[in-house]
Amino acid sequence: MVNLKNPVRIGVQLAPQHSTYAELRDAAAKIEDLGADVLFNWDHFYPLSGEPDGLHFESWTILAAWAEQTSRIELGPLVNCNSYRNPDLQADMARTIDHISGGRFIFGTGSGWFERDYTEYGYAFGTTGQRLDALAEDLPRIEARWAKLNPAPVRKIPVLIGGGGEKKTLKIVAKHADIWHSFSDPETLTRKLGILGDWCTEVGRDIDDIEISTELRGRTTADADELYGLGTRLFTVGMSDAEHDFTKVTEWLAWRDSKNAG
């Protein structure tokens, strides 16, 4: 059983596409002002929806700017692509943004999947299994580099791992993640939590130590209630168009507050 006592948090994934940087900066400020708990972007080089060659910005440089711009909200990539940067460099970048933000950085990471990024930027795409194996090999290097850096991170940087693969990804989650993020519906989440629990037992970890995170796209409050009952405590809301309509964010923040008040 996962920990059911933690409060609900709402994360907003502000996609760095189809907007000028000034528009993204203003949207980030609005998201913090509304009271969201976490501000995410994504780690890609081209838009994932809409015009394929539309406006797009790089993830980590934006995160550094948001870390300086904001004062309360946690922030991170949802998720970093492990293939795009040397693992020790990833650790140093994360530590640096952790300091810029005063200890608010979340290291969201995954194995990568968007083939156009790889092709256009000259990375070897390989297979899904090879990319997951690389993530499993690189996370210990990242953790070891955090232990060596001077100055050290402000806090133990939380590691969020995205993905739902039952043979490899969930084993990596069991070993390394403080937060596990997926797009699971309630039925799928129930099954995967059982598998994650088995992996946690195998690696000597308590599943209660892992915060469960789920995407809200297309969900109703009834769906969210069910996911909450299964132990989800971080819910993410996507914002990927140029209009930056905050209606859904406001509605989900009100739902969060009702859950935490109870």
Image (cartoon, rainbow, N blue to C red):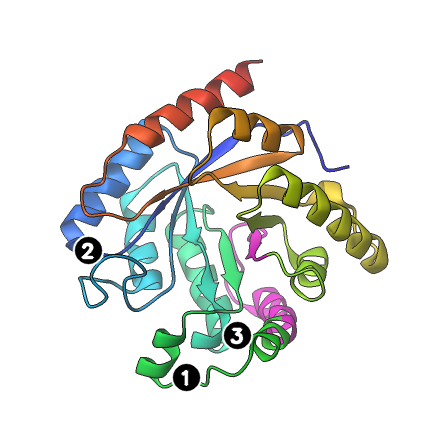
Location of residue 114 (image quadrant): bottom left
Q: Work out how far the residue at label 1 is from the one at label 2, CA to CA, in angstroms.
A: 24 Å
Q: Amino acid at mark 2?
A: His
Q: Amino acid at mark 3?
A: Pro
Q: Residue at x 32, y 35 (%)?
A: 32
Residue in front for this viewpoint, 99 or 160: 160
SS under mark 1: loop
Q: Position of residue 236 (x, y in %)?
A: 45, 41
The residue labelled by disc 2 is 18
The residue labelled by disc 3 is 87
Q: Earlier in the sequence, mark 1 or mark 3?
A: 3
Q: Residues within 10 Å of mark 2 (few under 14, many from 20)?
A: many
Q: Earlier in the sequence, mark 1 or mark 2?
A: 2
The residue labelled by disc 1 is 123
Q: Work out how far the residue at label 3 is from the one at label 2, CA to CA, in angstroms.
A: 29 Å
Q: Is residue 261 left or right of residue 205?
A: left
Highlighted magenta segment, given as a residue range: 136-163
SS under mark 3: helix
Q: Is residue 228 left or right of residue 26?
A: right
Q: Position of residue 4 (x, y in %)?
A: 69, 29
SS under mark 2: loop
